[in-house]
Amino acid sequence: MRALKEGLPYPRGAYFDGKGTNFALFSDHATRVIVCLFSDDGNSEVDRIELKECTNGVWHGYLDDVQPGQRYGYRVEGPWNPLEGQRFNSNKLLLDPYARKLSGSIKWDDSLYGYTISDAPDADLVMDGRDSAAFMPKAIVTDPASLVKAKKPNIRWPKTIIYEAHVKGLTMQHPLIPDDIRGTFAALSDSALISHLQKIGVTAIELLPIHAFSQDHYLLEKNLSNYWGYNTLSYFAPEPAYIGSGELEEISRTVDSLHEAGIEVILDVVYNHTCEGNHLGPTLSWKGIDNLSYYRQLPGDPRYYDNLTGCGNALNTSHPKVLQMIMDSLRMWATVYGIDGFRFDLALTLGRNENGFNRDHALFHAMLQDPVLSQCKLIAEPWDVGPGGLQLGSFPPGFSEWNGDYRDVTREYWSGKEGVLSRFASRFAASSDLFNEHHRRPWSSVNFITAHDGFTLHDLVSYNDKHNDANLEDNKDGADDNRSWNCGAEGDTDSNEINTLRAQQKRNFLATLFLSQGIPMLLAGDELNNTQFGNNNSYCQDNATGWVNWENADEDLINFVGELTSLRKKYNAISRAEFLTGKVNDHGNSDVAWLNVNGEVMTEEQWNDPNNKAMAVKFSSLNKNEPPVLVLLNASHVIVEGVMPCTDLYQWKFLMNTVMESETDDSKTSLMMAPRSVYVFEGELIKQT
């Protein structure tokens, strides 16, 4: 008989203090909580210990003889009344929401469901009596010692350049990474990969979800898988498949290596919903621990969930203990592993209460006042599927936001759509119409052309339509409105003319992204001509379709991206810390001048001309000793003659363009702008006599 001591209600989870382990689990509506201990292989339940103490809804107890490595789970007793939102079933082994490490994976079986599965419309009301332990992963007691060592790079927001990547997808086909570590955290610290990241000049790698996630039953039945990982099983434990060594230190070593290379690490985190799905979903953790507290119920009918996410459920972030769980998780990743920032999936759901979205939600305030998290980069995805589900520009100061309108308008501009020039200019200037209030800064706008969700850059210029047949959903999944243009042929073609145009369009998109005010985010593989063969929803493609293909790498395109990031780092004029105003400073320069192709200030008529698709933008730094940068853009399909703006202080020095196989004469004051092209010049100071 194990000796159980009273223990403490905090910290939550299984906390080893060097001698024994304290267990603490929140459940406001439970009547009894039992810790179940398992053998080293996780197959045999060897002991059950009831936690006798409950303080403010937290059940707790201390066991002297439980050491790191111990497998465990919970059984929680309470009312079974689904009509009232109560789904307690002690026959189900439950995963600790605070588990730091997992053993095994979900083995899909009907016993994982709290109710007896049948075709009856009220099936979820009938309790299932089977034990689910044999089919559940087990939590592992860990040593909570701090792991992070390397000093953080602390890249200033204006100089941040984000690279969105998938741990497995980025590394599985890299030819120089050893086979035995591909697809793991260790691969991210390989010198070959880090050298590539440094060559293209990114300052942060944003990883798709690395929290442990479930493999959806319906996908496995189709021989597919949850590749992206947006179906969280644990907010404190990493996905076991990404830890090749089996040791948590692999993560911290990788973060250390990236930090030493000057690269920050941002995690894409999914606190809006869990993998337990709707009322017909499995009982794996939160649902069986305290369904009413952890999840949002449908108003007036708690049998069902308020499905604001489109994924079956939504976490109840207004509950103080759920808010605390999210905060504890974020702080752990930031302090233990040294993570530099977080991108919040469907962040709108996190800020919802009974009256809808609230930018002053307690969770946002908690993050922004926290001494650790307030120093991290916080990025919101500003939408969900609930009422008023798009709130771009509505998050509080301190949060940046994925700017989906930047993506859409920029795609429209380079596809030649009429009447978008003024909207494009606003997006090019950090979308001040959306973000320039409440003392927010240009880095509030995270600009992107492509992301994991949608076409790659290569596919954006190669396909008019999605081709998602491999997802086995009759090509009905994924977005239909892609604002893409295949340049004259759908998919691969032998036409040199079309392939040349596609290559130029890629450069146009990349140049626009890195020359825009705000923060650029590059999708991993876009610099490599990576394709998903027209699949714009590769969430279930854990194979060559979803993985980055390094064999198609174009050194010229890689170098082009490196040149663009170098320009961005060198010139403060194109990576400003303040929004553009157009006002003339004490040195006689304005921070921005919007010019027509004749070098004159754009008129209202020219802005509103639907046929006008060309313009020039002169960015100037507040520092009088730093030269201005001139960007000329022509999205039309014809040659446009451009005239360099007149200035008494500078002459224009050519830096780069996006035109394939072209030459530019620095000595001329006029320029024949090729169809669909970008030109960049530096204002070289004329020596004064």
Image: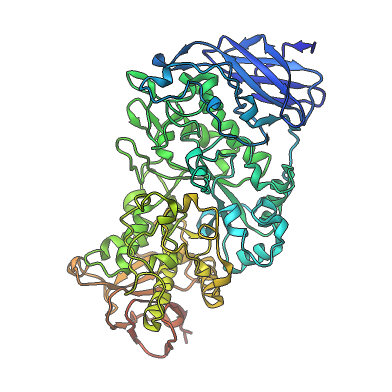
* Quarter assignment of residue 456: bottom left
- Image: 251 above or below 203: above
- Name the side, left or right, on which 418 lies relative to 383: left
Image location of residue 520, percent across then percent down: 47, 59
Q: How is the image coloured?
A: rainbow
Instruction: Please name the residue shown 38% across and 90% down the image.
Output: 668
- Name the side, left or right, on which 679 lies relative to 213: left
* Quarter assignment of residue 71: top right
- Name the side, left or right, on which 567 lies relative to 42: left
- Image: 242 above or below 202: above
How many numbered marks are there?
A: 0
Observer-nearest residue: 518 or 402? 402
Observer-nearest residue: 443 or 271? 271
- Image: 319 above or below 675: above
Image location of residue 515, percent across then percent down: 43, 67
Observer-nearest residue: 643 or 394? 394
Instruction: Please name the residue shown 46% across and 42% down the image.
Output: 345
Quadrant where the N terminus is found in the figure: top right
Residue 175 seen from this side: yes
* Quarter assignment of residue 45: top right
Image location of residue 4, percent across then percent down: 76, 12
- Image: 121 above or below 149: above
Image location of residue 152, percent across then percent down: 66, 50
Residue 621 seen from this side: no
